[in-house]
Every structure is written in structure tokens, then in C-alpha cells.
Image (tube, grey):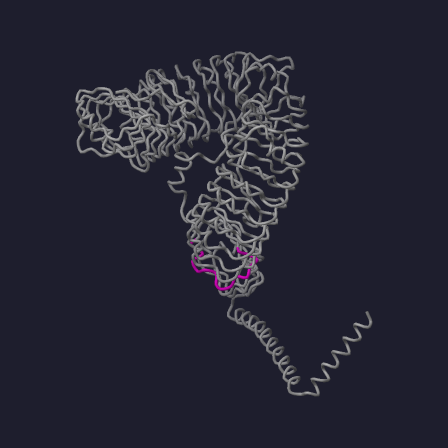
Amino acid sequence: MAGFPNIVPAGHNNYYHSKTLAGYPDMEFAAHVSFPNLLRVDNLEWLSRLSGLENLNMNFVNLSGATDWVQVINTLPSLQQLHFQNCSLGHISPLSYINITSLTLLDLSSNNFHSIEIPKWIFGLHNLHFLDLRNNSFIGPIPANSNATKLKYINLSFNFLNSTVPSWLYSCIDLEFVVLDFNFLAGAVPAGFTKLCKTRRLSLSNNNFQGNISDLFGNMSECFLESLEVLDFQLNQISGQLIDQLGEFKSLKYLNLNKNLLTGPIPASIGKLSSLKVLGLGGNKLTQSLPHSLGQLCNLEIIYLFDNKLEGVVTETLFANLTKLYTFSASDNQLSLNVRQSWIPPFQLIVLGLGSWSLGSISKIPSWLETQKNLSYYLNLVGTGISGSIPSWFWDTQILNLSHNHLQGELPDLSGAAQFIYLSSDKFEGPLPRVGDALKELDLSNNSFSGGIAHFLCDETYPTYSLEILHLGENLLSGELPDCWNKWPSLRYLSLANNQLYGSIPTSIGFLANLESLNLQNNRFSGKIPFAMHNCIKLVKMGLADNNLVGNIPAWIGTSLVELRILILRSNNMSGKISSAICQLSYLQILDLSNNELLGVIPRCVHNFTAMVMKRSLSDLFKLYGVQKSWYSYSTFSVGGFRESALIVKKGSILEFDNILPLVNSIDLSLNGLSGEIPNELTSLSELGSLNLSGNQLTGLIPEKIGEMKQLESLDLSRNSLYGRIPSSLASISGLGYLDLSYNNLTGRIPDGTQLQSFNASSFVGNHLCGLPLTSNCSDGGIKEMNEKAAEVEWFYVLLFLGYAVGFSVVCTTLVLKKVWRDAYFGFLERMWIRLTTST
């Protein structure tokens, strides 16, 4: 029975790039995608009557209603091939016995088996040659035992498997293709595969494998060296230096070690890999110069050397034999290119990354680039020092990154073929250019663009635009924000920060239903946060700091924006109480409401910020790799491109975190009028890294359990009215790097321990404390004297207040009882009033 293995409806975005490799499907990239199933079948019981069925292909048929499919399939003893790719299966039952012992091919890829382990019966199929379980979100380990020792092909990629590689896989002597990419597999480098004799592809990228690279290359069997064609260990934690044995492969065509921890030079033996087509060594810590032997690889098509510490001069002789080269990405190194002005390269590039290179003494864009007629996909010249204007043919490049240079002038309309344009930190000026509907990402930040943005946002050329990321921050843009955001329904990231925009935030911004990051900080926006923004339910970050916004913090932020991780409203004129509705933001990692006019108490429900209580949960990982699209831009995976960021106050200074670094959980409520006690519930936020409550009117004791916040790196409770002793548990927070308890009413000895004694005395001044690092002696006499002084100060204010009250009451009583004194007093006031009015 045939399904629809090769049919994709017209207009559907297929995220799969499939090809066939030696008769087996080879998946270059697999992101979760739900094809619209063209046929739905809710019951498979009719299959049980086909006892002689050998091949069943129902790819892309909706089988979500067939919950008993495993039991039905198990009634087919003659079945040899089962194709159930993308069938919307959500359930997979265990089997007490296996009847389908003839099965040689099982494809259950791209279904919905979330949060369940791989059933053990699958690995009891002892005749299985082909197994494809990719893209199912299976969790847990790869089963430790298996009877499927005849496997030739196994693909478990794009799941959440978290074990080591089980030893039984090394005993599958017929294994040709091993694909375990995009999991959480860990342990030492799985060198057991290097003893196999038929393996042609070994792909274990995007995992957590550790160990030295020499453990993999140091003891390879001769037959492994003969057979292997593809070796992919990208995005792991493999360390050590590349060794000469790397050059002993006889048939290797694809070598990808990008984004590991490799060090040292690239060995000259790499020039012996005569069949090599793809070389990936980017994102490591490789040093020294490029070996001349690299130029001997005449079959080389793709080179990735980006983000290393390579240095030296690269001449045109290195490229003399690389006639098939079409991708050269070596950005973020300390390399320089020394070629003749008249040089014509022997290759035609599609991808070129020379970011951070020195391109010679002439600062103009190199003339040899004009010979690259196929350079239409990717061009990265970030930080190369080039100046002048951009050649018109550059705008036909799909991904163009010319940031951090000295390019200048006004930009033409960007309505060409380009989809990703990054021109940050140059010297462009004038009005913003108009854009076309093909553009997906645009970064013009940190330039000198000026004027309004109405012509950019409200252009009538197209009814809607496809732009997903728009970064116009750090310019000289001015005027009010126009109210035509309905034309930009695809926007996921918007930054207009650090400009001169003013007026209210328009209500049409509520049409941005896909918006995940909003950055309007450091402008002059006024008015209230518009209610229409409650429609932006996908918001992950809201950055509205340093404006003139007023009103209460809307309760709908907590009830509607449930995906919010970053909320920054610092330095506005927000007033009123902090609503307990904000506690519904369980994903919140950064909360900054500092320097406003907020009153009332800190909500006790803060323990509901569960992202600050536990480390990243499995549900977050689903959002990163599974059902939901990642909120990072394309260029996150391209050196020198756009990155999301967040500014927080930590350790007394402003720090920036981006989407490559993990966020430090932070709460900042400083410089408001908050009162009451610090809620004990706050101490349950065990993953909180920075807490700032300074400059309020907080009273009471510092919570005794504050020492349970083991991840605290920065704590500021200064300039409040806290009293009592410093909890001894505070000294147990080993990672605390910044502490300020100054100007409160704290008393007693500073708890002993190297942690608190290591801080400067300024962290404790303005209290009634003793002990190191202060000079106040904590002897009995010292403590008595200190308490007496504190008591004297307190009694001084008490007596002063009582004296004022008694004197005032005596005067008032006398005026009431003595009519003569009362007449004289009011007569005096009348005469003084007449003098004042007549003199003026």
C-alpha cells in the first residue's frame, strides 16, 4: 500500500533537504514540520486481514486516530518494510511479544512521540537492517541492549536522547550509516566505531561528547580508514590537537569538526586527503598559519575555518589548485590576504566569509571580487576596514554582512534579491531606505540615519512585508512612531532603541502577533503601555527602559504575555503597586522595574517565577529544537551577524548578555518607593543570580534563608530601613561577588567567613555593625558602646519629637483658654498681613 512519500503540496515550505545516498535516505537537515496530510485514516484494523503483506508505505497519511497501530502491525508476520514517516502518530505501545520478525526496514521519522522513551521492542527486531526514528522528541537513553545486530543504517537524530553510546552498536559489523545528530548524548569520544570496517557515514554532531581528538584518530583500523566517507562531530566538546593520523583516510569526502575545543595547528598531513570535498574546522581555537598543503586538495569544494586564532599571510598560491571551491568561510581570524591587484581566482565562489581579515593596503572593496559572478548567496566582509560606497551588484547577494567597517553614504532602496542584510556600525547617513517584500532580516544599527520612519514603515508599495528582524537602534531617528504596524505581520524582532523618537506607542503595534522581542529603550516615548500589546502573546522580551512612560504596570502583562522571559521597564515614570498578576510569568528570567515611582509591597507570589527556581526544563528544550521555531535569527549561526541582547545591572555596573551566552536570572526593583518587608518567598529563587532592592523604604529583617540562594552573584539591599542582624547563612554563598548592605539599621557582628570579610568596608557603612572588614571592635565593651550610641541616637529623636508635641499642645491650649492672649495673637497676625499687602 502506497502513501505519499514524494508529494508536497504546492506552496508548502519544506524544511527537509533530502537526497539518496547509496540507496538510503540521507537527511542533511531536519526541523520539525507538520505536512498537511493529504489522507486521513482513523482505523488500521483492516490491515490484519493482509497476512501476506510485505511492504507498507503510508508516509504523510494522518494516522493520529489509529492508536492501536502497533498491535495491528504486529499481526503481519510477512511484513518486511514499514514506512510511517510524518503520520502524526502520537502513541507507540509496548509489545509483550514480537510477531513481525521479518521486518528489515522501519521508518517512524517525524511523528509526535513527545516525552516518551524509545520502546525496547524496536531493538528486539533481529532482522532489522534499516531504522529511522529521527525527529520524534524521544527522551531518555538509547536502550542498553539490542538484538538488532544486523543494522546497516540507524538514524536517531533530532531527539532528546541523553545516554552514552551503547556498546552493542560497536558490534553491528555491517553498519554503514550512523546518524545520531542533535541529541544530548554524552561521554567520551565514541572511538569504538573506528574498529568497524563498512562504516561510510558517522554523524554525531550537536551532542555533548567530550575527550581528546587523539582518542578518535589515534587508533583507527585499516578498514575504517578505507571505508569512511563522512565524519561529522560538529558542535561537541572535543578537545586536543589534530594529529597527523588525520591524513590517513583513503575515501574521506566530508570532515566536519566545527565548534569544538580543538587547539594547536592544522597538520600538514591534511593535504593527503585527496578525496576531500568538505572541510569544517571553524569555531575552535586553532592557531598558527594555514598549511600550504591545503592547496593540494584539488577536489575541495567547501572550507570552514571561521572563528579560530589562525594568523599569518595567505597568498594566491594557496588557491591555485582549488578550482572546485565554492564556499570559503574563514571569518574571525587574524589572517591577511596578499594577492595582486590583477589577480583572477581559479574558482567561482557562492559563499565567502573574510570577516576580520586584512585585505591589503587599499581600503576599497577588492577588485577581484568582481570576478566572482556566482557570489549570490553569502558575503561576509565584517571588520575588514573597507570604506567607500557599496557596489550595486552586492545587493543581489542573498546574505550580505558588511558591518563594522567605514562604508558611508546614503543607501538605495533595498528591493532586490537580498533576504538578509547586516550593515551595523558603519557610517551610513541620510533617510532610511525603502525595502522590498523579499527581505527577512535588516540590521542598520549604530549608524547615522536620521529623519522620521513613516516613509519606511508605511510605504504603500506592498500591502504587507516579510521582514522578521528589524534593528534600527543607535541612530539619529526622530519624530513620532507611525501607526501602521499592521503592514509588518511577520516581525519577530524589533529594535528602535537609542534614537530620538517620542510620542505614544501606537496601538497598531498590537498587530505584531509574531513579535518575540521588542526594544524601544532610551527614547522619549510617553503615555501608557497600550492595551493592544496584550495581543503580542509570543513576546519573549519587552524592553521599554529609559523613556517617559506613565501609569501602572499593566496586569495583562502577567496574564497575556505568558512566554515573557525578559521584562525591562527601568527608568520611566511608572507608578502604583506591583500587581500580583506579574507572578504568572513563570518563564521570567530578567525583571527590571528600577528607578520608577512604584509603591506598596513586593508581591509574595514571586516564588512562581519558576525559571528562577530550576534550571532549564525539558519543555524549554522542546521550544528550542522542537515544535516551536527558535527566536534567534539566521545570523546567530553566521559569524558577525545579528544577536539578541539584554542589559542588566549586576555587581554595581551594567552588563550585556546576548543570545549566545546564558542569561543570568536577575530581579531589580531599586530606586522606587516600595515598603514592607522583603518576602521570605524570594529566597526560594535558588537560580537567581542578581538581586537589587536598594533605594526603597523596605523594613524588617533580612530573610534568614537568604543563604539558600546559592547562585547569587550580586546582592544590593542598600539605602533601606532594614534592621536586625545579618543572617549567618549569607556567608555561605560562595559565588557572591558584589554585596552592598550600606545605610540601613543593621546591628551586631558581621558573620564570620572569608566571603563577607573579603568585601570592602563600604558594603556595610551606615549601619551599627562591627567586625571585619569594619574597624569597629566586636569585644563586649565595643558592642556595649555601639549599642549605647545607637540607643542614644534613637532616644534623641524620641525626646525631640515629644518636646515638639508638648510645646505645640501648650501653645494651642493657652490660645483656647485665654481670650486676651487669643485676641492679641490674631491681632498681631492681622497687622502683619496689612503691612505685607500695603507694601506690595
Q: Is residue 100 above or below residue 763?
A: above
The quadrant the C terminus occupies is bottom right
Q: Does residue 613 show up magenta in the picture?
A: no
Q: Quadrant of residue 129?
A: top left
Task: Please indicate whether residue 295 sits to the left or right of residue 78 in the image.
Answer: right
Q: Is residue 720 at all visible to an observer of this figure?
A: yes
Task: Please indicate whether residue 622 sits to the left or right of residue 739 in the image.
Answer: left
Q: Does residue 703 show up magenta in the picture?
A: yes
For the magenta stretch, what is the residue range? Answer: 693-708
Residue 148 drawn at (x, y percent): 24, 25
Q: Quadrant of residue 2?
A: top left
- Foreground of the two, 601 or 489: 489
Which residue is at a point 54% across and 13% down the rendered structure image? 347
Residue 749 drawn at (x, y percent): 50, 64
Which residue is situated farthest in the right direction here?
839
Q: Is residue 192 at all visible to an observer of this figure?
A: no
Residue 788 drawn at (x, y percent): 55, 73
Q: Is residue 483 above or below residue 294?
A: below
- Foreground of the two, 409 or 416: 416
Task: Please indicate whether residue 609 sits to the left or right of residue 717 in the image.
Answer: left
- Foreground of the two, 335 or 717: 717
